Image (cartoon, rainbow, N blue to C red):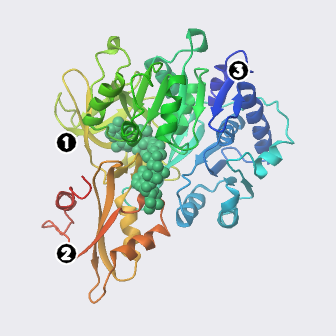
Amino acid sequence: MSHNLFAALRAAFPAALDGIAIETDSGLNYSWADLERGSAMMANLLQSLGLPDGARVAVQVEKSVEAVVLYLATLRAGYVFLPLNTAYQRAEIEYFIGNAEPAVVVCSSANFGWVSKIAFNAGTQNVFTLDDDRTGSLLARAAHCSDQHAAAIKQPDDLAAILYTSGTTGRSKGAMLSHGNLLSNARVLKDYWGWRTPEQGGDVLIHALPIFHVHGLFIAIHGALINGSKMIWLNKFDPKRVIEKLPEATVFMGVPTLYVRLLAETGLSRDACRNMRLFISGSAPLLIDTFHEWTARTGHTILERYGMSETAMLTSNPYQISQGGERRGGTVGFALPGVSLRVQGEDGQSLPAGDIGGIQVKGPNVFQGYWRMPEKTAEEFTDDGYFKTGDVGKIDGDGYITIVGRSKDLIISGGYNVYPAEVEGYINELPGVAESALIGVPHPDFGEVGVAVVIAKPGAVLDAGGIIAALKAQLANFKIPKQCFVVNELPRNTMGKVQKNLLRDEYKDLFV
Ligand code: MLC
Ligand code: AMP
């Protein structure tokens, strides 16, 4: 029996394949048949390249339906999808391609010059282009391929995707997710969030998130496809457009910044949300004020859930009271069915209700390890097979889980992860810099943003603006500190370690 994720999604397509599967903002409609045929053609193209088993297909392209079709085709043909944020710059892409050694790289035609050079240097033989206006060599080549394709036979542990997630020290790690990991999560969420099949009246999802991370790529797309639901597709999040489309939709998923920006629009009202069934938030903490304001303005209670690249979704607030209670703001709800979650103290003992400790998880959704990093993988699992999330939290007497912080030094800005160690590494390389610390401070729009505190080498004169400009040339835009301060010294403890908590306290009011 095959466990191919594509095959499972395909099996849930409505019987009438000529119905609309994806409606784009530019007025183009894609039918279920388009997804079926398009993914077959691209899968045949990939297969015609004679790729080895487990070959990686690395993709850095703007959001488009064709990019989704490429994702589906990669699953269908049995290869491993590796999505890359379009904000990543040359050095970042060089690392990912060098580390993952993809057999195929797909990039935008504007970036073909430098991306193909990196790819060919890393031994990749096939570089295609794909643009968000339905052009590029990938589509031109696929147009010659058959639109019939039998999905590759896959076992639950066979890899479906690799998602790079930055390391607390050093470089990014590729989280290896299997067909079984992703399919089990999609099935659990279909039930838990009460998705309605077309026979039950159907759901319509507004898809406004980027498609190179767990939230937009897996949770949103799998959710719609495994339920045969239509998606209203926005290539970029635009709060006004979302509000215009709300009356045609029933489900919306966003990171907290999206909710903050929607609340800033006067058009957000109960009437606009009259047909909505569910608003879901995740990827970063949703402020309790946002949670309450949303209910007051729309009459809907946001359902907050928690997950990560290594595990897809782990916990969720209940969709219905019968699942254990109401949706509680400030909490991430309960462990999902099949996920076992515990909170452990420093001594490795499980903690009683209300005590704060490290969150550890086990379940069919938990990844297969970090790509080519067996030691790092072993470090992140306990002896009894639980994955250490690096998040710190507690479980209250009613079973609701609250995340109170992170043991990993991580900033989550607008739903994107920024690892201070990585940014500090780049700052420390700049001429005249002796040392730096990147801290996260509260921000009204992005929730949290990075601020750099830098010390100059003796005799050197540093310019904060120059540091930011230099970083912009090297790093993805969301990793750029929103402000930089040049100071004489950094606060340290008796061990000489920089006390970031003191810096966070000093700069906490910068933006609020
Ligand atoms: C853009 N900028 C950001 C930023 N996004 N800075 C910090 N954090 C971010 N997230 C920069 C821009 O480069 C620009 O800099 C300035 O901030 C203002 O940009 P903007 O025009 O306001 O940004 P915009 O393009 O509108 O993007 C904002 C956003 C986007 C919120 C729509 O960041 C976004 O789509 N976030 C969602 C991320 C996501 O999907 N995460 C899921 C991860 S999965 P300058 O200098 O150029 O002016 C995961 C697991 C799970 O975490 O549980 O789901
Ligand atoms: P990523 O590595 O991009 O997958 O990010 C995963 C991290 O996002 C988790 O380890 C959490 O720290 C954080 N996260 C995801 N959802 C939530 C949430 N609802 N509340 C707080 N943090 C969250």
User: What element does badge 1 sit on?
Assistant: loop
Q: Position of residue 140 (x, y in %)?
A: 82, 48
Q: At which x and y percent is residue 2?
A: 66, 25
41 horizontally vs 454: left or right: right
Question: Quarter holding the N terminus?
Answer: top right
Return the residue at label 2.
489
Three-letter code, disc 1: Asp
Kindly state the secondary structure of the residue where label 2 is placed: loop
SS assignment at label 3: loop
Residue linked to disc 1: 347
Mark 2 and mark 3: Cα distance apart in space: 64 Å
Q: Which residue is mark 3?
A: 19
Mark 3 burial class by Cα count in 10 Å: few <14, some 14-19, many 20+: some
Q: Nearer the viewer, residue 259 or 57?
A: 259
Dot 2 crowding, Cα within 10 Å, few <14, some 14–19, many 20+: few
Q: Nearer the viewer, mark 1 or mark 3?
A: 3
Residue at 35% of width from left, 61% of height from top? Answer: 482
402 with respect to 178 (left or right) = left
Relative to 306, 400 lies left or right:
left
The quadrant where residue 34 appears:
top right
